[in-house]
Amino acid sequence: MIAACASPIADERLIDYWTGELAAADGAALEAHLFTCAGCSARLEGVAAVAGGVAALARQGRISGIISRALLNRLQRDGVRVRQFTLDPGETVPCAAFPGDDVVVTSLQANLTGVRSVSLRVTGPGDVLFGAIDDIPVPAAATGLLWATPGAFVRSMPSQALRLTIRSSDDALLGEYVLEHTGRERGGEGREGGEG
Amino acid sequence: MHPGVDATDGELARAIGAGTSETAETELYRRFAPRVRLYGLRHLRDEESARDLVQQVMLLTIEKLRRGDVRDPDQIASFVLGTSRTMAMASRRTEARRERLRDVFLASDAVAAPDGGATLDLDRLEQCLAQLPDRERSVVFQSFYAECSAAAVAADLGVSEGNVRVIRHRALARLRGCVLAGRQAS
């Protein structure tokens, strides 16, 4: 059983400590408390476990959704094998992923000048909705979106054309793109596990 | 008498110094090893280095207590923290030297990335992450993997730093709840 703490540290502060965002003196004071307090140490253990798990998933390429350029750079710096496709509006790109690919990142270029948020829709054959992400914030000077999908998931998909559509928050069309995805069944000799 | 789980830190330290109780050493280790590991993870950012730090710090602490070299046993927590700081700093210097050597002698892709999160069910965590709204998931990956500051994430998302902290805290609480619920269900 863990003894109750007389002056528990707020979770937000524990997270700030873990992410290295406390001033040195504040961090040192917090550490002095942690070394005498089983309760707060146990709560920090919870933060550390989830943070470590998130990092482990990312290093395995098990990351999905819209990612920032900083995140993409970090993945590449860590040696995560990233298969990347870049599409301009109106472009159709054949795509394939291979067994060694950890994550597939699709870079959708668009003129986002003056746009603060967008939505992304991904549809398959027959306009069947494959996925949708709303209210994606657009950083200043952004020139597109980076959409990540784990390589293992992409490898499980059949051959099909995926239509991707970016719209602004007031529903203006900003870009349409098509990924001609080659699935495993058409991968052929020596390039098993296609897609994109 | 054998001080155990109910003993204060100081009582444990004195019992070790007096050589009267082996259980005191076990309890002191049980109590402080996880805290030293967390300190190591926070400052060395690597599970293996953190575990090495635990072994070095706890060994030195117990040896010093046995020899009566710790001036104030009631301040044993402070002693363990100070020792952790000193040894982590030395470890960082060693690692920096190793990295310079690796830069010189090895291709960068020959250096394996550390494998954290070994104690968590990663499949479950992945499912829990998928349930988060996209913005929260993005904040989580940027904060805990890419090591972006709240200010950097805020600039990327076009929200305030305070807002990022709220999102980060909320997302973490949801993830922990979701992972724990999965553990109980299985």
Image: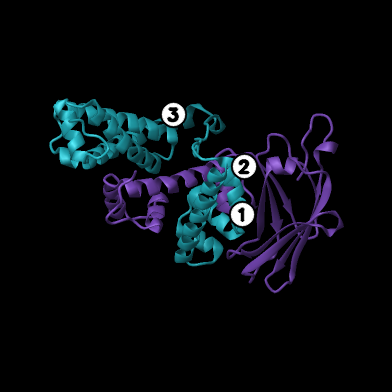
Chain colours: A purple, B cyan
Measured from the top left, where is residue A36 in percent x and y? 26, 45
Measured from the top left, where is residue B7 in percent x and y? 22, 39
Residue that mark 3 sits on: B101
Which chain does the numbered disc 3 sit on?
A: B
* Residue A94 shown left or right of residue A141 in the figure: right
Residue that mark 2 sits on: A61
Q: Quadrant of residue B185?
A: top right
Viewer-nearest residue: A7 or A166: A7
* Residue A106 shown left or right of residue A75 in the figure: right
Cα–Cα gap, marks 1 and 3: 43 Å
Q: Are marks 1 and 3 in contact (CB under 8 Å)?
A: no
Q: Residues within 10 Å of mark 2 (few under 14, many from 20)?
A: many
Which chain does the numbered disc 2 sit on?
A: A
Going by the numbered disc 1, the residue's amino acid type is Gln
Q: Earlier in the sequence, mark 1 or mark 3?
A: 3
Q: Residues within 10 Å of mark 3 (few under 14, many from 20)?
A: few
Going by the numbered disc 3, the residue's amino acid type is Leu
Residue situated furthest front in the rendering: B1
Going by the numbered disc 2, the residue's amino acid type is Gly
Residue that mark 1 sits on: B131
**Residue at figure coordinates x 48%, y 65% from the top left:** B163
Instruction: Work out whether residue A76 can be spotted.
Output: no
Measured from the top left, where is residue B182 in percent x and y? 56, 46
The quadrant of the picture occupied by the C terminus of chain A is top right
Q: Are marks 3 and 2 in contact (CB under 8 Å)?
A: no
Q: Secondary structure at mark 1?
A: helix
**Residue at figure coordinates x 56%, y 50% from the top left:** A71
Cα–Cα gap, marks 3 and 2: 28 Å
**Residue at figure coordinates x 52%, y 67% from the top left:** B159
Q: Is residue A169 above or below residue B182?
A: below
